[in-house]
Amino acid sequence: MPDKDGVRAGKPVLMPSRLWKRPLFVAAAAMVVLSLSLAGCGGGGASGLASGSSNLNVFVTDNLSDTYSSVWVNLHKVTLVKMDDTTVDVFVSADGVQTDLRSLNDGQAKYQFLSNADIPAGPYKGVRIDMDKDLVLVANGSSTGQKVQFADAYDSSTAGQSTVNVTFPQPKSFANGENLPLDFVLDQWTVVSGKVTPVVHKSEGQGLDSSDRHVDCGVHGTVAGLTGEAPTQTFKLSLYGGPGVTVNTDANTVVIAPEGSTATTLANGENVSMKGKWNPATRAFDASWIKIENPEESRMPEALGASANVVPGSGTFDVMAVATKGFLPSSNQVHCVMDTDTVYKSDGGVTLTKDAFFAVLQGHSGLKVDVRGTYDEANNTIHLKFAKLDGDVHLGLAHAKGSVVSFDAASSHVVLHLLEWEGFSWNGDQNVDLTCESDTLYWNTDNSQMTKDQFFAALSAGAKVFFETKLQDDGLHTRSLHLMPPDNG
């Protein structure tokens, strides 16, 4: 049985990994809750602004409505309107950003960062918001949504879209770095014969400067201007034609390799998805996790929410969606079906087997998951290619494999040059210095347990070692070291 940190007292269990050249070992540990929204976000400060221009951050929020549990819309464009009716786009997305407006109030306004843009000097008299004409309303007490449309009076010049015009109380000029929060006033929306009359105001932004009022969200883009050394780095993530969102990483940021690779080192030009929270103090995102992606991965439909109705035998479960990307769910309960090539990840980015993944879902009711795959609209089902735990249980210590650079039995140190790693950020040009602890376990090439003295006696320069480590605020804590056969990797 596992101990209190999930490390087995007996032999470790071999866990096949599609991102690794050889089987891995899996153990368990505790983790921090990640509550994420998949809605598009952008950000960053201004740089190289033209004279008289300013950088504007755009947010969406909602007042409290007790009529609906969810209101799903697809946002395409936000446009500022000058006094002479000329316009400036501050957010444009051809595919749109799917947003559950109702989730943006828990008794107080919550803010979702939508985009940022460099804009010419005002004044501006208002803003236009373009959305899909179709939207989904989920009434309180129901898990099934009602597909409705915005009233015909709001039809846009773009087929299948609607436009809502918002007039500012008085002409507005925006200072550099100012915010534009847009409040979708759901308790004033009306529905007649399946047609919705919306109400949107410019919000006063109460609580906007408080970090706990910002929802975690997802951004997909390209890395540029990367500075610093892993795990502490800063970069710009291009988004929606704006100057780019600024992203900060630290030791708590998980970096996940793309499918078919073991590379978790960030680089300029990489396509990534980032999950994190807007930090109003730094005007940047603090990244919870980053997934380096192949182009096809970034286009996959995605959903996030609590798991329910878990059936390991059939490889299915439901996601009580609080956020989606690429589709508007017909209800909050999105059905998920495993495929033979589904990749399973712990919250720390470590690859899991299907059995280990489902064991965690079964053992922790309502655990949050982030899933991607092919969406079947007729059955409100995702056929999964990727499933990641995002709940309050951490299954999997960080894993790595490296070649021995040096070692010292007296001080219990092993220095490795890393070849592959999962579950933590690392600069591939640096060696890692591991300190063995009193509870570190040692394993031979045949998976038999060794003593510390036997392990160090068997070490030699260049030998391959696999290790499991627990990440804490004061660094890596070595939980187990495994000698690997000479032909392994």
Image: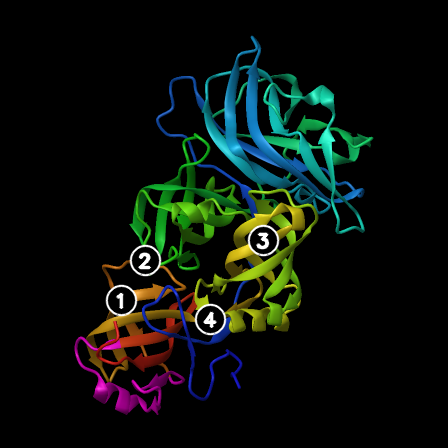
- Give the structural element (helix, strand or loop) at label 4: loop
| Residue at (34, 75) in percent of width and height | 467
Report which quarter residue 132 is drawn in: top right
Q: CA distance from mark 4 to mark 3?
A: 25 Å
Q: Answer with mark 3 or mark 2, whichever residue precedes in sequence.
A: 2
Left of 428 or right of it: where is 158? right
First along the sequence among labels 1 and 2: 2
Q: Residue at x 43, y 20 (%)?
A: 53
Q: Is 304 a magenta residue?
A: no
Q: Position of residue 415 (x, y in %)?
A: 24, 73
Q: Residue furthest left?
A: 461
Question: Horizontal and vertical percent for residue 93?
Answer: 51, 32
Establish if 197 lies above or below 41.
Answer: above
On residue 396, the disc is 4
- At label 3, the amino acid type is Ile
Residue 82 occupies which quadrant of the picture?
Answer: top right
Provide the secondary structure element on which disc 2 rests.
loop
Q: CA distance from mark 1 to mark 3?
A: 36 Å
Q: Residue at x 46, y 18 (%)?
A: 120
Residue range corresponding to the magenta coloring = 438-464
Provide the secondary structure element on which disc 1 rests. Answer: strand
Of callouts 2 and 4, which one flags the residue occurring earlier in the amino acid sequence? 2
The residue nearer to you, when weighing 128 against 119, is 128
Which amino acid type is shown beneath numbered disc 1? Leu
Q: Which mark is residue 303?
A: none
Reading the image, the residue beneath label 3 is 382
Q: Which residue is mark 2?
A: 263
Q: Nearer the viewer, residue 309 or 203?
A: 309
Q: Secondary structure at mark 3?
A: strand
